[in-house]
Image: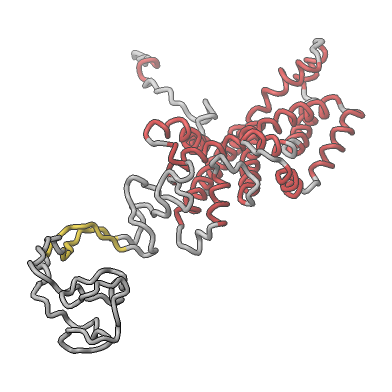
Amino acid sequence: MTATTVDSTKSAAPRKAKVNRWDSPWLNPKFISGLAMVLFVALMGVLGPLFWDVDLARVATSPQNLPPPWAPGYDYGMEEVVVETAPAAAVEAPAGPTKAASSLTGGNPLAPSNSSSSSGGSLTGGNPLAPKPTASGSMTGGNPLAPSTSQESAPAQTATTITRPVTTNPYGFGIPSWDHPMGTESNGRDMLAVLLVGAPRSLRIGLIAAGIGMLVGIFLGFTAGFVGGWVDNVIRTLSDAVITIPSLAVLIVISAYVRSVSVENMALLLAIFAWPGPTRLIRSQVLTMRERGYVQMARLSGASRFDIMFKEMMPNLLPYLASSFTGNVSGAILAATGLEALGLGPTRIPTLGMTIFYAIRAAAILRGMWWWWGLPIAILVIIFSGLFLMTIGLDEIANPRLRGVQKQ
């Protein structure tokens, strides 16, 4: 009896190493989809000027009130139109005395008469009651509207056939053109240029405001949660007091008194009320993390408070901080759009909110100009949807339990 041995190294088929969400949690489809949508809006300001003239976003650079050529309800075609034209033919005056052309007003009474019967040649035309050598002998000069008995004949009219474009326009605006693929508005601005310029600026307002708020919130939240004591009481009381203030009302008052509102000024105004929320959330996370083992070991090893907070604890909170940042960007963009829709934004700089404000002021909804207010709202929907998907994806990255949830 012989024993056979099987080589396990040959029988086992080699497996291909696959990259999955457990090996690399950042490969989250929701996070990648949301990031792509946000990057699309951000790159509009960089790649847009390469294929479109963004100077058309200025006032009076384009025709007014042109709908986009792809709008439903517009039928295009060519039609032939017959136009009658009269040639300007010169008529030679006959020799000898001719009859003056009949005028509805009777002509100039001060003009010298060419009649052979006039003897005095008076400037006043003589006695108007004297009988004139007319065929009818009327004292009033006859009917000026009566057909002339002159032998002159009117020049013959010629018919010309021309071809012109026609369109069925349900709104009564101008004829759309592919020179303005997104249409124009009442201020004479091209909507595609307005979107290419305004969308990245609205996103930049949210990024700056949320970035400043997160930096202040990280510093105050880590300090209050890790240090504790009277420092924690002061920071917590201050953040709780500011978070109860109606920020929109205060921002309206401040924006009304600011003379020149730019993108940076608008972001700084929004950052005034963007730090209390992150401060409270980060503080609560630090309170749970400061009692963990690696933090205690860092204390026993003699590490400073700054190193423990920002070198040991903060890397573990990066997905959570990124998720909170995307949520704050959405809130900042929404607040900026609300202020701009009230007319309190940068008036000289095209943004999505100011575009909606001008559309409301010009009654674009009642006039049927849906492309004026609909396209900016569509861009805002893309921004908010992308940021929301990024927030959900970052939550799944930070929490492994969410990545393991299966549909029942």
Whether residue 173 is visible: yes
Task: Say left or right for 71 vs 374.
Answer: left
Task: Say left or right for 211 vs 111.
Answer: right
Task: Say left or right for 112 vs 395.
Answer: left
In the image, residue 137 lies at what x, y percent? 20, 89
Task: Say left or right for 185 vs 181.
Answer: right
Above or below for 204 versus 154: above
Q: Nearer the viewer, residue 7 or 257?
A: 257
Q: Nearer the viewer, residue 290 or 124?
A: 124
Q: Quadrant of residue 391?
A: top right
In the image, residue 397 lies at what x, y percent? 59, 32
Q: How is the image coloured?
A: secondary structure
Q: Nearer the viewer, residue 373 or 158?
A: 158
The residue depicted at 76 percent of the width and 46 percent of the height is: 250
Q: Nearer the viewer, residue 295 or 53?
A: 53
- Quarter of the rendering occupied by the N terminus: top left
Q: Quadrant of residue 170?
A: bottom left
The residue depicted at 77 percent of the width and 20 percent of the height is: 295
Above or below for 265 versus 76: above
Residue extending farthest to the front is: 120
